């Protein structure tokens, strides 16, 4: 808290904070209000009577109904969940082992290997999708969930590896050495000591990976073509924007429902997640 | 059994020669302390005995078996780390039981041994707590408990008391000593604190820059240090040193510099005669100095000027100037001395130490 006079606190703390919050939350507010606003209000001109863009007196669930009944939204939700979960699990498993190896085992080129992994993470997806598309086509995986489950780890594994590497480095080496003196093999020391201690780190990596794959757009757009295979971000934008006609109501309802699982995941793990980011393992 | 032998043990970290040709025989039931300034290779030596660090050359054997290539788990040792290394996600009970579980002990035997250790260390009340719910001293006890439940052949301690506050450190030091008397397990203990080394060790190994300087019982190190380094390291306040020249004058040998002139005691004359005309370092412990009285022979007194007076209650430490050197004298608390006083100090002739000025070895 800032010390000093009350006005000082208002000018330097509450005011900027309020502006920041408005700036941050307004898009969400707009999304919510649009999802529940009837079409009649959405498409009237700005100079009509009773025009008030910031709230509605006649909320409706029409757009949500439309989404579930007239589009494949529930199918997209399922596709996204499945793809995000499986690719997250794959990336976490690889990331935990790779991060452990890079941070603990001293083998030749461990350092440069770590840097190499980080660099692959820096290659933009907008370039990487071109060679990947070629590979997906060769293995005839196009238009299946596997095209994404197998390509998402290309950026998720480096990401998880780096996060876990940092986390493992923060765990005192003595913990593991003590376990090995106590009679645990390297594998058991990892299983019974290191991994349980690293749970907060693993959870944060998992949430990040899940969110990244949930929101992913480019690969999903390129590798999936039939409507029933699509993920939420691609399905909503491709099926609810026809030509230059925007179906604003269902579009926003889709965006809202699409962000709910991520929000739940965050709030559920938020405590672990925060301690994971601050990464403290004090005995 | 728990006999540890180090034979020509060396450790290189790339170009750093951290441990140089260490030879040592640690007997069964013995409490051996490695002491030396930070970075002298104590921890590295201990970790090589534990099997946590590869041995660059030489052998470590336990009970006659060379263990160079034996993994830590097969050496039947237990180690207490400086930061305790308690498993943060396990209760105190599970922390202590872990080593036994890994070795597939029966559940009842585990419970019995943990209880036994908890009783010895008086930690029975918080077996269910997690390490973060314990104070520093309690964590220390748990770390000890985790080592003793295993009934290992050798205990290894790496500065286990250095994270405790001064009072607790003294208390735990006594408890460690009692614990060792009770269990009789061989112990190798690393510390940078010479008081800990002197009080705990059956024998003390003084190290410096990876080289063992002297191995001996605490009083041997105190009374006959092998070189100037050991002399200065053991004992508190530290030994005073002054560079003097050996002079031969009508049968008597004197050690002389600008500030003092001391006679060489009869018993040392034979040994020191061949250094006549050369520079020698003389060593005088503060506790072997006192304020001179009429009964002190003139050859063993010298004038000094008081610079600082430190009242400790049980004694007074006088920081004095003697010629170009400063010295500390631990004198009787009844002495009334003030800054800038000129006083005559007398030395106990039997307690003079002489070192070669070049090689620093004791003469
Ligand atoms: N893993 C390491 N890599 C390189 N040098 C090391 C390593 N561990 C210790 N050293 C070096 O070896 C020397 C002895 O270290 P150590 O045994 O830890 O000293 P201490 O007596 O303080 O316990 C020091 O000079 C230290 O810098
Ligand atoms: Mg050390």
Image (tube, grey):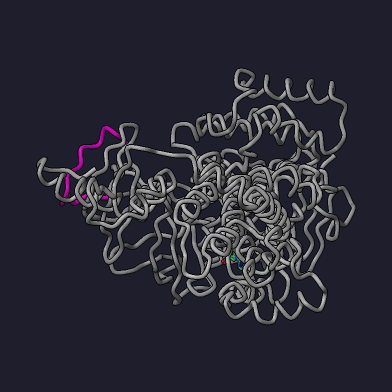
Image quadrant in which the N terminus of chain B is located? top right
Residue A231, position as x, y percentages in the image: 63, 58
| Residue in front for this viewpoint, B308 or B273 | B308
Left or right: where B308 falls relative to B249: left
| Residue in front for this viewpoint, B236 or B223 | B236
Task: Dividing the image into four quarters, tell me where ligand 1 lies.
Answer: bottom right
**B127 shown above or below B331:** above
**B325 shown above or below B17:** above
Magenta stretch contains residue A28:
no
Residue A115, position as x, y percentages in the image: 60, 75
Left or right: where A3 falls relative to A264: left
Left or right: where B96 falls relative to A3: right
Residue A105 quadrant: bottom right
Magenta stretch contains residue B334:
yes
| Residue in front for this viewpoint, B285 or B298 | B285
| Residue in front for this viewpoint, B306 or A113 | A113
Q: At x 74% / y 25%, what residue is drawn?
A: B114
Residue A179, position as x, y percentages in the image: 73, 45
Answer yes or no: is residue B132 visible: yes
Residue B149 quadrant: top right
Chief secondary structure of the magenta span? Answer: loop
Q: At x 63% / y 55%, what residue is drawn?
A: B43
Answer yes or no: is residue B268 visible: no
Which portion, as a residue range, is magenta? B331-344
**B174 shown above or below A11:** above
Q: At x 43% / y 50%, what residue is drawn?
A: B285
Residue B30, position as x, y percentages in the image: 73, 41
Q: Residue furthest right?
A: B65
Image quadrant in which the C terminus of chain B is located? bottom right
The number of numbered badges drawn on the structure is 0
Q: At x 33% / y 69%, what residue is drawn?
A: B257
């Amino acid at each position: 808290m800032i010390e000093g006079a009350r006005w000082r606190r208002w000018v330097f703390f509450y005011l900027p904070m309020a502006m920041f919050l408005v700036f941050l939350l307004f898009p969400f507010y707009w999304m919510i209000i649009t999802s529940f606003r009837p079409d009649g209000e959405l498409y009237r001109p700005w100079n009509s009577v009773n025009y008030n863009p910031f709230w509605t007196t006649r909320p409706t669930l029409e757009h949500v109904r439309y989404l579930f009944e007239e589009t494949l939204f529930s199918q997209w939700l399922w596709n996204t969940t499945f793809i995000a979960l499986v690719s997250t699990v794959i990336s976490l498993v690889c990331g935990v082992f790779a991060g452990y190896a890079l941070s603990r085992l001293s083998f030749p080129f461990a350092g440069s290997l770590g840097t190499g992994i980080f660099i692959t993470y820096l290659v933009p997806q907008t370039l990487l999708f071109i060679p990947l598309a070629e590979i997906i086509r060769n293995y005839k995986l196009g238009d299946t969930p596997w095209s994404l489950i197998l390509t998402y780890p290309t950026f998720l594994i480096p990401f998880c590896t780096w996060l876990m590497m940092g986390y493992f480095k923060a765990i005192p080496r003595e913990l593991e050495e003590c376990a090995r003196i106590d009679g645990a093999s390297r594998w058991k020391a990892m299983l019974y000591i290191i991994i349980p201690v690293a749970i907060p780190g693993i959870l944060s990596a998992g949430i990040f990976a899940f969110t990244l794959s949930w929101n992913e757009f480019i690969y999903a757009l390129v590798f999936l073509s039939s409507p029933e295979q699509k993920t939420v971000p691609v399905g909503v934008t491709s099926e609810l924007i026809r030509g230059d006609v925007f179906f604003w109501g269902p579009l926003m309802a889709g965006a809202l429902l699409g962000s709910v699982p991520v929000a739940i995941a965050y709030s559920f793990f938020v405590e672990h997640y925060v301690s994971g980011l601050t990464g403290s393992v004090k005995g | 059994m728990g006999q540890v032998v180090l034979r020509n043990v060396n450790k290189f970290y790339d170009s750093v020669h951290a441990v140089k040709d260490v030879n040592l025989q640690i007997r069964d039931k013995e409490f051996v302390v490695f002491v030396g300034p930070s970075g002298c290779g104590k921890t590295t030596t201990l970790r090589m005995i534990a099997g946590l660090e590869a041995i660059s050359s030489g052998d470590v054997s336990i009970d006659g078996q060379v263990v160079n290539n034996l993994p830590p788990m097969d050496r039947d040792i237990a180690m207490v780390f400086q930061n305790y290394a308690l498993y943060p996600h396990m209760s105190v009970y599970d922390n202590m039981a872990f080593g036994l579980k890994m070795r597939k002990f029966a559940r009842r035997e585990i419970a019995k041994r943990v209880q036994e250790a908890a009783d010895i260390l008086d930690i029975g009340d918080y077996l269910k707590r997690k390490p973060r719910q314990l104070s520093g001293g309690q964590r220390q006890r748990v770390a000890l408990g985790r080592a003793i439940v295993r009934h290992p052949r050798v205990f290894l301690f790496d500065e286990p008391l250095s994270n405790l506050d001064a009072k607790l450190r003294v208390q735990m030091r006594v408890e460690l000593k009692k614990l060792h008397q009770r269990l009789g397990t061989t112990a190798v203990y690393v510390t940078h604190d010479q008081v800990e080394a002197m009080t705990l060790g059956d024998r003390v190994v003084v190290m410096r820059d990876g080289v063992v300087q002297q191995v001996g019982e605490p009083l041997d190190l105190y009374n006959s240090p092998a070189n100037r380094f050991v002399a200065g390291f053991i004992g508190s306040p530290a030994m005073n040193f002054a560079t003097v020249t050996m002079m031969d004058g009508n049968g008597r040998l004197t050690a002389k510099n600008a500030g003092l002139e001391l006679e060489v005691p009869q018993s040392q004359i034979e040994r020191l005669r061949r250094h006549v005309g050369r520079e020698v370092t003389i060593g005088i412990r503060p506790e072997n100095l006192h304020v001179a009285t009429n009964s002190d022979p003139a050859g063993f007194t010298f004038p000094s000027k008081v610079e600082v007076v430190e009242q400790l209650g049980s004694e007074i430490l006088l920081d004095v100037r003697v010629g170009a050197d400063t010295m500390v004298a631990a004198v009787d608390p009844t002495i009334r001395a003030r800054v800038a006083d000129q006083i005559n100090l007398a030395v106990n002739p039997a307690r003079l130490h002489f070192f070669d000025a070049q090689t620093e070895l004791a003469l």
